[in-house]
Image (cartoon, rainbow, N blue to C red):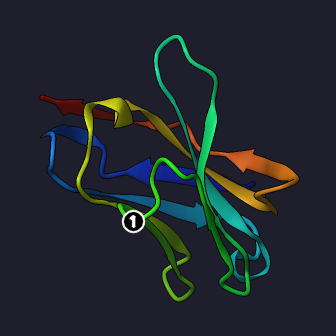
Amino acid sequence: QVQLVESGGGSVQAGGSLKLSCAASGYLFSSCGMGWYRQAAGKERELVSSITSGGTIESADSVKGRFTISRDFAKATLYLQMNSLKTEDTAVYYCAACGSWYRGFIYWGQGTQVTVSS
């Protein structure tokens, strides 16, 4: 059974940083592309960043230069380092696995709340 468990969300002031983690299990972590989505209240879900099994990264323009996606194969964990956070980054952040930036993903985590205050 595939499980994706996010952690690291919380509340931070604008300009601050958070690092999200997504612990994966139940499938071959190294063979799947992974990504981070977010959904703000009243808005559509947005793909924030993705990384292929080979390490190719795609990111939304709104987070380029501020957010960094990475993965640790030994720990089967996906990360999202978020710096210079803005109030508009406030959302529920979801980890996704087995897919790509252009095709979407099959498996989803339960989400973790990130709240950025001014």
Q: Answer above or below: position of 70 versus 67.
A: below
Left or right of 94 in this view: 26 = right
- Residue nearest the viewer, comparing 65 with 4: 65
Left or right of 65 in this view: 2 = right
**Which type of secondary structure does the marked residue at label 1 adopt?**
loop
Left or right of 17 in this view: 29 = right
Where is residue 6 drawn, in percent x and y?
45, 50
Using a 10 Å C-alpha cutoff, classify the residue at mark 1 as few (fewer than 14 neighbours), some (14 to 19) or many (20 or more). few
Q: Identify residue type, mark 1.
A: Gly
* Number of callouts: 1
Q: Residue at 63% of width from left, 30% of height from top?
A: 45
Where is residue 61 drawn, in percent x and y?
54, 52
- Quadrant into which the N terminus falls: bottom right
Residue wearing tag 1:
65
- Quadrant into which the C terminus falls: top left
Furthest residue to the right?
103
Q: Residue at 79% of width from left, 62% of height from top?
A: 98
Q: Residue at 50% of width from left, 71% of height from top?
A: 77
Determine which quarter of the picture holds residue 30: bottom right
Determine which quarter of the picture holds residue 65: bottom left
Determine which quarter of the picture holds residue 11: top left
Where is residue 60 drawn, in percent x and y?
58, 52
Furthest residue to the top?
42
Where is residue 49 drawn, in percent x and y?
58, 58
